[in-house]
Image (cartoon, rainbow, N blue to C red):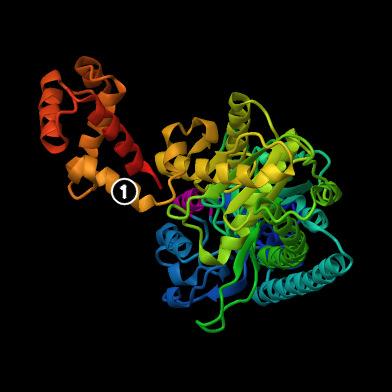
Amino acid sequence: MSNDAKDSGFGQQELTFDAGVGHGFSAESLTVADVLSLPSMRGARLIGGAAGLDRVVELSNVMEVPDILPWVKPGELMLTTAYPIRDRPEDLAGLLETFDRHGLAAIGLKSGRYLEQIPEAAVRAADALGLPLIHLGEDVGFDEIMQEVLTGNLDRRAQVIARTEASMRELVDVVVGGGDLEDVCRMLAQWTGVAAAVTTLDGRVRCLRTADAEVSSAEVSALECFDRSGRFRVEDEPAGVSRRGEPRGGSGDAHTARTGSGRDDNSTASEALNWGNVVIEGGRRPAAETLPAASNLGRIVAFGAQALRAGDFRLLEQAAAAAALVITREQAITAVESKYRTDFVLEVLRGHIASSDRVLSHAHSLGWDLDRPISIAVAEVDSEADSTDASNKRTMQSLFADAWTKVVSQFDPRAAVVGSGDQVIVLLAAEPRERIVRRLEEFVSSVRGHGGGGRRQFSVGISRPAEGVSRLAPAYQEAMRALEVGRQLARGQGLRHYDSLGVYRLLLQVGEQTELRNFAEEVLGPLATDAKEEYAGLRETLQELLDHNLNVAETARALFFHYNTLRYRIGKLEQMVGPFTEDPDLRLSLALALQIVKLP
């Protein structure tokens, strides 16, 4: 309904509005704009609060007593003849503010008998609050308005129920018919009218589909709910909340919560969009404390021109349930295939080889090429720093392995990549040491970023090239030793090649690790422990002195110490470990002992 601006007869200028045509999801309840288009509202004029036309009208009420506030409910259309304020019309502005605090949707005022003119202050208050103030026609009956509001809302809810049932049937057909996440996203995008996406547990986009040809996936991905890498910000986007924003770099109040309200315009991603998400849950809901909690399989996100309301989120939850079935089915298939591949690789790496030809033939059937020089890389999550919830552990392990598979296959499609718990084993084409290290550094960067391996700390060990299947088992041990040393030295985020281990290669060959520890304690004395906080600092000072060939000036600069401070520390160290500045054999023993202390 649209009216031209004209004099309302009450000293105010009537405001124009356009109820518009809805797009995407259907609202469960009428808005104020919808109410103004009802037959019973003929002759009604909006005289203030046009910014609130999208307020939801759940029900209607009549104010004919002064103490109406205890009976006011959120979402009400309040109808009145102004009888309670007939003697003090100036109180209307304050009453509007009180109604707004109570969540009222709009005020319908039938003036003439008890209120000749609506005060200017009331209109200004309505505009400031965005609370629609409507002048009702003289021949309008309150009962007619209330009946049409009730009937209109019941019709809307019946339509939502019918649509919900139809969408559930469509989703069931998709899942039963072998559909995938692309199909679920496509259907949801059609329902929203703009776009839909499914993400992993940590927000990596698995699929994104748009329904509007004028809106591209890139435009949707530029919204502020995604970070620069294209990851949906699950940590900042609460489930079940409708939000509105613009693309990064756009204007406007982005990331503003708009639950229950939003512009009813036909905007696009180049302007602003609304979005909401729900968690995709798999497994069982705990009916008792003894049952496992449902696992988090990711998020499903809907993008629309209008704010998402309760009915929209019910549709979104249905789509999430369908997505959970699809993901669970995929995981079941992948788990069987992954276990089969992993068991085969582990058997080879343990040296259980009946025939090299059979191993090569079987690897070829899996799409792997092991008939060439192979470098083995082992990536393992730091269990001490990993904060993944137990119910999501398997999902994160799968994401970690999938990320490695994706980034490695782009470089070497014939490489073998398998996951085993928190560990991923990669058998790829061998390269010279410097080149393979750079290669793995690129892989690590990609897995931690765009690859979607999750924000988890992990270390990587790299073997020397293995010539032939029979050399794969020793190469795996080399990668494991490099992994262990790198993790210890870099606090869970190391990357080491076996050839870069130096003296650690010899130390790790010693079968009895207790003997190494005893040697370190004999040489370093109390410095081999962390019994006192200062011991770690003294070990660092000793290491720097040895690294700089006992050059006091260079060591002081490296440690940012005053020259005399370092001299004092040297004296203290010699009291604890002996005259190492004069005894080269003692320096050698100290250097070895310091490396032993760092061993895993």
Q: Main secondary structure of the magenta part?
A: helix
Q: Secondary structure at mark 1?
A: helix
Asked if residue 558 lies left or right of residue 364, the reply is left
Asked if residue 400 lies left or right of residue 348, the reply is left
Image location of residue 567, percent across then percent down: 12, 23
Q: Nearer the viewer, residue 538 or 65?
A: 538
Residue 376 among those drawn in magenta: no
Q: Quadrant of the N terminus?
A: bottom right
The residue furthest right is 177
Give neighbour class at mark 1: few <14, some 14-19, many 20+ (Cα, 10 Å).
some
Identify the residue at image location x=81%, y=38%.
Answer: 214
Q: Nearer the viewer, residue 380 or 551?
A: 551
Residue 121 among those drawn in magenta: yes
Identify the residue at image location x=43%, y=57%.
Answer: 93
Q: Nearer the viewer, residue 551 or 320?
A: 551
Write down the quadrant of residue 179 in the picture: bottom right
Image location of residue 228, percent across then percent down: 59, 36
The residue singled out by tag 1 in the image is 517
Mark 1 belongs to which amino acid? Arg
The reply to whether residue 106 is visible in this rendering is no
Identify the residue at image location x=53%, y=84%.
Answer: 288
Write down the quadrant of residue 582 in the picture: top left
Image location of residue 385, percent across then percent down: 43, 52
| 400 up-or-down from 431: above or below | below
Image location of residue 61, percent across then percent down: 57, 74
Q: Which residues, given as a range, are shown in magenta?
A: 119-130
